[in-house]
Amino acid sequence: MLYAPDVAAVDQPLTSKLAAFGTTIFAEMSALAVRTGAINLGQGFPDTDGPTEVLDAAVDAIRTGVNQYPPGPGMPVLREAIAEHQERFYGLSFDPDTEVLVTAGATEALAGALLGMLDAGDEVVLFEPMYDSYQACIALAEGVVKPVVLRPDVEGDGRYGFDRDEFRAAFSARTKLVLLNTPHNPTGKVFTRDELTFIGEVAAEHDALIVTDEVYEHLVFSGATHVPMATLPGMAERTLTISSGGKTFNTTGWKTGWMTGPATMVSAAKMAKQFLTFVNGAPFQPAIAAGLRLGDDFYTGLAADLEAKRDRLLPGLYAAGFDVFVPEATYFTTVDIRPVRPDGDGIAFCLDLPVDVGVVAIPTQVFYANPEHGRHLVRFACCKQFEVIDAAVERLSTLGA
């Protein structure tokens, strides 16, 4: 969030649970891009369409009458495709009828999980920086955020890491959930098997449930491997896994997501989800099912294409003078702006950047529970066409000129 609303007025109707949250950073910066005509490397959405097979399946569904309410849990064709996907890629077996739920994107899946499983005062251990809906949904559920900081270059290897003692200390008798995002937005970190094993062991010691956000599961670069938490010994029975088709199939506007996990966890999330959107996107559901059944060459090519775009952006960020933290996955690259702006004010930098050079980025501090941890960090997206990235790089080269 950039700006918190004024809640001092007597007639302010906003619930106190959301009083600390203003308009999302994505809305603020995308509007700024429109006003200034800047290149938008802020919000993470692609500027090309997804595979023809997926788009054609949606059009066919619309034309053949798939335009009314789908079943509450999601259309069987999609729930079956999701179960097949989890078995195909990870060896995880789920009952499409009781252990799979279709949602309005991963954001609703997260909201349903948190609202459906948290009581007032329950604590959620999670890593910061974090996707901005996490804190808001926990606040709506009257839960308590217990953040653990991801810091760049903790081990001297350029990767983001965390202090294991700090992670363990975040747990208490009130801990109900661990909320984990891997591959991670905004840092581009892919948690290693060793890190995940440690996280799972501590969660099990405290009998905590685990909710994982894995929407970037197929956007992993050379040298890194995505390991779903549910594949680790003893974790399947306590892990609810969330993903979506938006990032994988360049269909972010379709808002088609899902969750898989133990029937009890899926049922709890479904109880809340049914009072949010109830159902959504009927013609998009068979289309995403078609996407999930595409061949391995599609998935390999998807990651390779995005890695090439990352590698197109990185030299420009270095040349602009930033300290750059090379991402292992996702759409995003984080930079330290202090070599370019010594005061390290990321919000001011991002507000000035569209006006000064015509590029939009996101100030990473808005993804932190404790903003001072990320005040000097800024996120750029590489999920654009090569010519767009090249134009942005050329504009960034004028920084400090």
Image: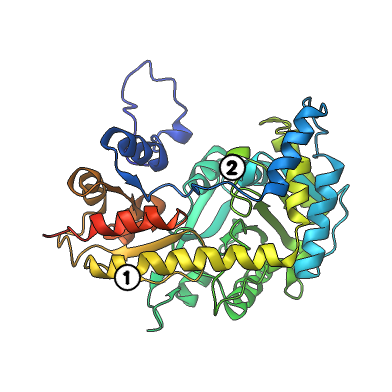
Return the residue at label 1: 315
The residue drawn where x is 86% and y is 43% is 76
Q: Residues within 10 Å of mark 1 (few under 14, many from 20)?
A: few
In this rendered view, identify the residue nearer to me: 84 or 12: 84
Instruction: Give the vertical position of 281 relative to 201 (above or below).
Output: above
Considering every residue shown, the one lying at the far top of the view is 11
Q: Is residue 302 above or below residue 152?
A: above
* Residue 324, quarter of the rendered image: bottom left
User: Which label number is shown at residue 292?
Assistant: none
**Residue 228 point in image, percent of width and height:** 68, 67
Q: What amino acid is found at the position of numbered circle 2 in the picture?
A: Ala
Give x and y (percent) for residue 132.
46, 47
Check the image and report above or below for 9 versus 17. above
C-alpha span from label 2 to label 1 = 47 Å
Query: Dot 1 lies on which element?
Result: helix
Looking at the image, residue 376 sits to the left or right of residue 194; the answer is left
**SS at badge 2:** loop
Quick check: can you spot residue 120? yes
> Is residue 188 among what the camera can see?
no
Is the residue marked by circle 2 packed among few (<14), some (14-19), or many (20+) residues within 10 Å?
Answer: few
Displayed quadrant of residue 207: bottom right
Say above or below: 61 vs 364: above
- Find residue 309 and report its horizontal and vertical position in percent: 45, 63
- Residue depicted at x 68% and y 62%: 298
Amino acid tagged 1: Pro
Q: Quadrant of residue 336?
A: bottom left
Residue at the bottom extreme?
156
Q: Position of residue 349 (x, y in %)?
A: 22, 51
What residue is shown with label 2? 120
Quadrant holding the C terminus = bottom left
Identify the residue shown where x is 39% and y is 70%.
Answer: 151
